[in-house]
Amino acid sequence: MTLFSLAKKNVKGNVKSYLIYFISMIFSVVIYYTFVSLQYSTEIQESMQLSQAMSSVFTGGSIVLVLFVAVFIWYSNSFFTKKRKKEVGLYSLLGLRKKTIGRMLFYENLIMGTVGLAAGVALGTLLSKLFTMIFLKLLDSAVDISFSVSVEAILNTILVFAVLILFTSVQAYRLIYRFKLIELFQAEKEGEQAPKASFAAAVIAVILLAGSYWLVFQPMTTNEQMGRNILLFTGGMIIGTYMLFRSAIVRLLSASKANKSRYYRGMNVIATSQLLFRIKGNTRTLTMISLLSAVTLSSISVGYSMYYSNGNNADESAPFSYSYISQGEALDQQVQGILENDTEHPITAHLDIPVIMLKGDISALEYVPSGFPAHESPLKLISANAYNQASKALNREGNLQLSGNEAAAILPRFTSDLSLSDYEGRSISLQTPRENRKVSLVNLLEGRVLRWSYPDVAFVVSDTAFNDLAAQIPPVIYKVYKVENQQTTKSASDQLANLAAEDMQMSSYYTVYREGLENAGLNIFILGFLGLVFLAATGSIIYFKQLTEAHADKGRYDILRKIGVSRKEIRASVAKQTFFVFVLPLAVGIMHSTMILKALSAINLIVGSLAVPIISSMAAYIVIYLGYYVLCANSFNRIVNNK
Amino acid sequence: MRTVVEAKQLRKIYGSKGNVFTALDEIDLTVQEGEFVGIMGPSGSGKSTLLNMLATIDQPTSGDIVIDGTSVLKMNEEQLSVFRRSKLGFIFQDFNLLDTLTVKENILLPLALAGMKVSELERRVDEIVDKFGIRPLLNKYPYHISGGQKQRTAASRAIVSRPSLILADEPTGSLDSKSATDLLESLKDLNEQDQTTILMVTHDAFAASYCKRVLFIKDGRMFTELVKGNTSRKDFFNKALDVLSVLGGSVSDVI
């Protein structure tokens, strides 16, 4: 019998214990290949207006995936070798040379890796078509999808996994050299010490977590603050979580033993002590699951909220369906003609908004656009009358009344933390060729009427003040149109874009909406994809870990049944323990992700009303996660309660 | 005197048609309150099968078992659990202690399961630990103590709920001779002072010599019975050895 056939027989004979490793291998290949094949898909590239942005986002995504896949394979490989140490020790004891054993393990790993790779690519080919369809659906594009295999994607996948498989195979080869024979035999007895945790470490865990949470609420306006706070926040959260499971939870469980009348009741004594031992052996797993959950939840929430708030963003950025700065009668009529010809989108409102562009001193205000001096910042002024008309055309409530030197500020974008009190009573000074005119702010308006552009500082002044100023600085005329069904005005928008000159600042709601949709669609797809992968990985890690423990605990439950514990009581206790192991990292993950989302909105990476997308993402995650719990509790019960 | 165990015409058959093996046949057994009964026989004679049926872990093919006035064969799983918990105490060859619990927690487990009040529970544990000399070990975990100490912990757990019957399955099987002697002395004291009823399966004539009465099983049938009466333990030991040699049990098992 050659060594190669011995290795082959080994794989065949131990299908069950190899299966977990094998499945995680296939799983990794499938997700990676699916993702990469989307990246190379010509259909997707054709349907995107921003294919440049797409390829960079996909490249970022695939780097994250490579990292993830590497960690996941390394994890399942070490989990797998841990179970086999005894077998390897036995070979050595029976007189097989170390070199021979090493080579056998090397071949085994190579066989499994190669077969897993092939199976993964085959399965991935099917799945990538499905994901392409989902992706195009998210983008609202109607493109027929042919069934094609991307050679580049296959080569990319094979390259990445060949490296990983080779690496794990070398690890397998070295297994026999890394450990003494006696250590190989004692592998299964590891971690049977009574858990002890220092009080200091528990306190540090709480301080670290509280501290990193506190950082989120600190101001992060400059890049320097932002970089430092995010680094500290991430570090504190990771180390804090590890120490939380390592010490604080152990400490809490030990403390719960002190309440004798609760601890000594029924199965509590079993459940508590089992949990103590289990958490001790699972610190790293629980930490990883908490952090993965946090990342998954945040990324799904971010992706969904971007997609969800795209309409709002477009409304904010382009309140009217079309807007441009008038460049003379001839061009205005051309535009008017194009829009009137577009009968599918009848015009519901058409306004001229005169705007005075000037400089002014706004150093009394909280918000100064960066890159401009506070005492000489570019401003836009609108008259109260024009503002009220525009509001009416946009079906907004409210009527603004200003007199004399009163003015109202329009809330700049991405400054939702500012409120009326930051403006009311303060004054700004407007520079004209003849004077420095002081106006005092009496109101803060949340709805903009002009399209968004940077610097975003605009004020509404009284009609008399506006007319005074207009006599000194001639206003530009913004022509704005509102049409019905403004989300679908592709042809008219394209025609206007061709017409537009540089300084016309032509903008259409459609272009803004469409770009936002593509960006958001791309983001939700990639974040959702990564989220699904992480969720699947989290679920499988916790599931297999629990099942291994169920097998290890089987003997204990046999003893319990012999001394008179009924199957029903064991089932209830198992359900309780598993619940604890599942819910603990979930709760920590949810808390972390809330903080991450808070931090992301503090640096304006996500904006707008997020309650709906975040709550629904979390609800979906919790439902799937609890599905894993039910599955796991049932399997655990079946294993320990069998016969 | 009260009858604790009454087994009638027990029969246990393994396998199905064509390939039948009779493990036990026509076994009658009666144990009175306060007795210390040993069951001996060579390997494969069916003594462990008998003990498992009395422990309600296994069911006979036919026959009836009455323990403490209750027929155990008609009970369902849940009733049996409660029955085992309240009426029976177990001592196993491999101790069967839970390694995630301290010695004290292992001992009080049956009481905790029965929902006893903490004060009463602590008092009971306190009472027992001196009988088996394990007070200094109470807060240790099973992997920190020796085999003999483990078995004494197991014995404490078996008697803590004051069961009607203690079932011991080769309790000295994993112990060295000093620990075995200590344990047997403790069981003997328990039987003589507290009138605890003990049924012990063993293949070791030395262990059996501590019993008041020894039953011998061969090929699944009752072979003979020895009663200690007023004979010394040494004589009783020799008598048991004689029976064993007739039975064909391996004498090399004897210490």
Image (cartoon, coloured by chain):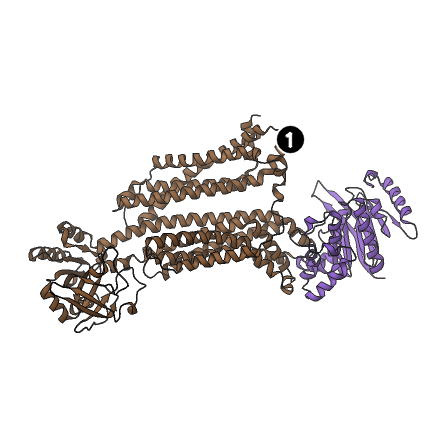
Residue B17 image point, x, y percent: 70, 42
Observer-nearest residue: B61 or A550? Answer: A550
Horizontally, is A617 left or right of A374 in the view?
right
Residue A97 percent coordinates (x, y): 60, 28
Give the image location of residue A497, x and y in percent. 16, 51
At 51% from the left edge and 40% from the top edge, which residue is drawn? A77
Q: Colour of chain B?
A: purple
Judging from the image, mark 1 belongs to the subunit labelled: A
Count of labels shown?
A: 1
Asked if residue B237 shows in the view, the reply is yes
Q: Left or right of A115: which side holds B30?
A: right
Q: On screen, A108 above or below A617?
A: above
Type of the residue with mark 1 = Leu
Q: Residue furthest top?
A: A2
Q: Secondary structure at mark 1?
A: loop
Q: Residue at x 91, y 53 (%)?
A: B229
Chain identifier matching the brown colour in the rendered picture: A
Quadrant of the snapshot with the N terminus of chain A? top right
Q: Which residue is mark 1?
A: A94
